[in-house]
Amino acid sequence: MDLHTFKQRILPVQGRLFRVAQLFLRNREEAEDAMQDVLLRLWTNRQQLETYQSLEALAVKMTKNLCLDRLKTHRHQKIADGNDWLDVAATDVSPYRQVELADSAGLMHRLMDALPDPQKLVLHLRDVEEYSFEEIEEVTGYSVNNIRVMLSRARQRLRDDYVKANNYEAGH
């Protein structure tokens, strides 16, 4: 694979790789480093890339594995670095509502962090990255039925925990 082909096929997925890395590492700089490591590994092994059916699935899987390795190695403490996925600075929203939305986003971050890693990954790939079940199967190695069960359980747990947290907060 030459440089031109590499740029055409690999570089467009950088955004997804970064988001997957940030999902696990919860740190912008570490996520960028992980993404760069994956890109470097892909470039180093570019001659073998033609044998893979989906380079995007391979790159996402490599990113996931690298992040999990880093978390194990460094015993990384996951810290949510703000509510970067929710833009609460909309001009047509009152300051009170902005604070409320930021609180809800923070709560959702904490609840998602509490999910087991496989559920968190499947939920992210399906609902954030909008992967098909077949693409998720290729990335994770889980069967489509297993993915559906994991996704259902993750959504149900988020829903239950969110309602519980809001009911508790309203009661006090």
Image: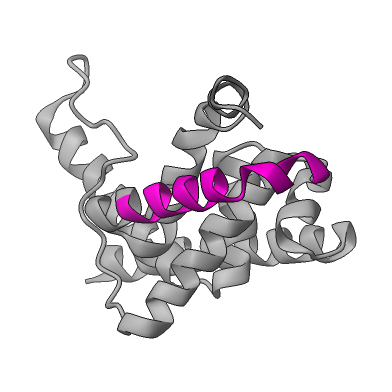
Residue 6 or 104: which is nearer the viewer?
6
Q: Residue drawn 56% across and 19% down?
A: 4
Question: Splitting the image into 4 quarters, where does residue 111 fall?
Answer: bottom left
Front one among 25 and 154: 25
Asked where in the image residue 116 lies, by quadrant, the reply is: bottom right
The correct choice, above or below, for 12 with respect to 30 in the image is above
Residue 11 pos. (x, y %) = 50, 29
The percent position of residue 88, horizontal first and vertical second, equals 23, 32
Left or right of 146, for residue 47? left
Quarter of the image containing the N terminus?
top right
Q: Assess whether residue 4 is covered by the magenta stretch.
A: no
Q: Position of residue 125 (x, y in %)?
A: 61, 48
What secondary structure do most residues of the magenta stretch adopt? helix
Q: Residue furthest left?
A: 95
Confirm whether the magenta stretch covers residue 44: yes
Residue drawn 41% across the image and 44% down it: 18
**Of all residues shown, which one is farthest toward the top?**
92
Q: Position of residue 62 (x, y in %)?
A: 58, 58
The residue located at (28%, 55%) in the rendering is: 106
Q: Which residues are magenta?
A: 33-51
The residue depicted at 26 percent of the width and 60 percent of the height is 80
In the rendered image, is residue 77 in sight?
yes
